[in-house]
Amino acid sequence: EIVIIGGGCLFKGTLPGMNKLVITKVDCNVLGDIYYPKVEMENWKLINSDSYTKNSDNDYDFTIEEYEKLWLALNVISS
């Protein structure tokens, strides 16, 4: 498994070959200059979602969502 964790150009260049997305959504507003490219979410299936509340280690509530590319799931089923 290869993990891409950063760089706007790196995200954009590797997205077409990805078969799995793990997205962390943090409940806060921050300023930034690097954004993940637009993802056509209808091509992805949510396979796991875990929510966490703020605590002594985390200043904000957050959710970690794991997606699988739909064509991958279809290829496995038809094999």
Image (cartoon, rainbow, N blue to C red):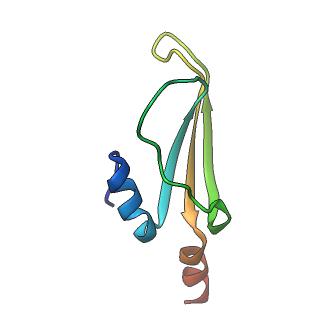
- Side (left or right) of 13 relative to 44: left
Image point (36%, 63%), residue name: 13
Q: Nearer the viewer, residue 26 or 30?
A: 30
Q: Is residue 9 above or below residue 24?
A: below
Q: Residue furthest top?
A: 56
Image point (49%, 55%), residue name: 21
Q: Is residue 14 above or below residue 10?
A: below
Residue 75: image quadrant is bottom right
Q: Nearer the viewer, residue 57 or 30?
A: 30
Locate the N terminus by quadrant. bottom left
The percent coordinates of residue 26 (x first, y second) are: 56, 30
Q: Residue furthest front?
A: 33
- Side (left or right) of 2 relative to 50: left
Locate the C terminus by quadrant. bottom right
Image point (44%, 31%), residue name: 32
Q: Is residue 23 above or below residue 11?
A: above
Residue 67: image quadrant is bottom right
Image point (54%, 13%), residue name: 55
The percent coordinates of residue 73 (x first, y second) are: 58, 74
Q: Is residue 5 above or below residue 78?
A: above
The percent coordinates of residue 17 (x first, y second) are: 41, 70
- Side (left or right) of 30 relative to 46: left
Q: Nearer the viewer, residue 67 or 43?
A: 43
The percent coordinates of residue 70 (x first, y second) are: 60, 72
Q: Residue furthest bottom?
A: 79
